[in-house]
Amino acid sequence: MEYSELAKAIRENDSSRVNEMMQKLVPRLKRFLSIHMNASKSDAEDCAQETILQCIEIIKQDKLRDTDKVLSYIMTSCRNNYLKMKEKMKEENYEEVPDRNYSSAEQLLNLLDKERKRILEWCLRQLKKEYQDFMRYWFQNPGAEAEKVAKHFDLSVSNTWTRKHRIISKLNDCYKKKSEL
């Protein structure tokens, strides 16, 4: 999806086009927060919604100079909003002294998250070096457009998508096998 079109639709007050694009963008932001920031489902939803509202206002006020980088701006804003939200939660938590330790369920979930990351890292190391580099680039640049990735790796856009899909399938299969052991 061409996100510079989103900025154009917002400026033109084309709510149907904006809504159509948001249907694709909001889930992407939620996945980004869940996967890369380890956000809970409700935190991801709140943060994605807050980010979208802020970004729409920024675009309406014509404060975004380079509309070709709308996605990058939104992803960065989303990450920053999430970090601010977590920091604010910590501050609020310090005001109230907990009368209990973390529950066993919370500790178990944290351990499971660490285990998932360890398995994914192991599966990633099983790939060829060039595929490892390719996927690490995507993980480090989750908001990157396919065109940018294609240019970085000297591939066509269609080959970029095909390669990404195939590697993700391999990682998924590896993860399933490894996690069943």
Image: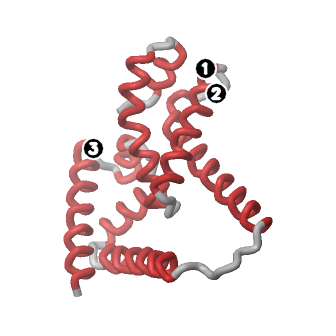
Quadrant for the N terminus in the image:
top left
User: Is 77 rendered above or below residue 168?
Assistant: above
Mark identifier at residue 60: 1
Q: CA distance from mark 2 to mark 3?
A: 33 Å
Quadrant for the C terminus in the image:
bottom left
Q: In the rendering, at what x and y percent does residue 156 appear?
A: 27, 44
Residue at 46% from the left image edge and 25% from the top image edge: 6
**63 left or right of 112?**
right
**Secondary element at image label 1:** helix
Residue at 65% from the left image edge and 80% from the top image edge: 100
- Identify which residue, 76 or 134, lies in the foreground: 76
**Secondary element at image label 2:** helix
Query: Quadrant location of residue 64?
Result: top right
- Identify which residue, 169 or 89, lies in the foreground: 89
CB within 8 Å, label 1 to label 2: yes
**Secondary element at image label 3:** loop
Q: Residues within 10 Å of mark 3 (few under 14, many from 20)?
A: some
Q: Residues within 10 Å of mark 2 (few under 14, many from 20)?
A: few
- Amino acid carrying label 1: it is Lys
Residue beneath disc 3 = 156
Mark identifier at residue 58: 2
**71 left or right of 100?**
left
Disc 2 vs disc 3: which is toward the camera?
2
User: Is 52 rendered above or below residue 115?
Assistant: above
Residue sitting farthest toward the bottom: 181
**42 left or right of 53?**
left
- Amino acid carrying label 3: it is Ser
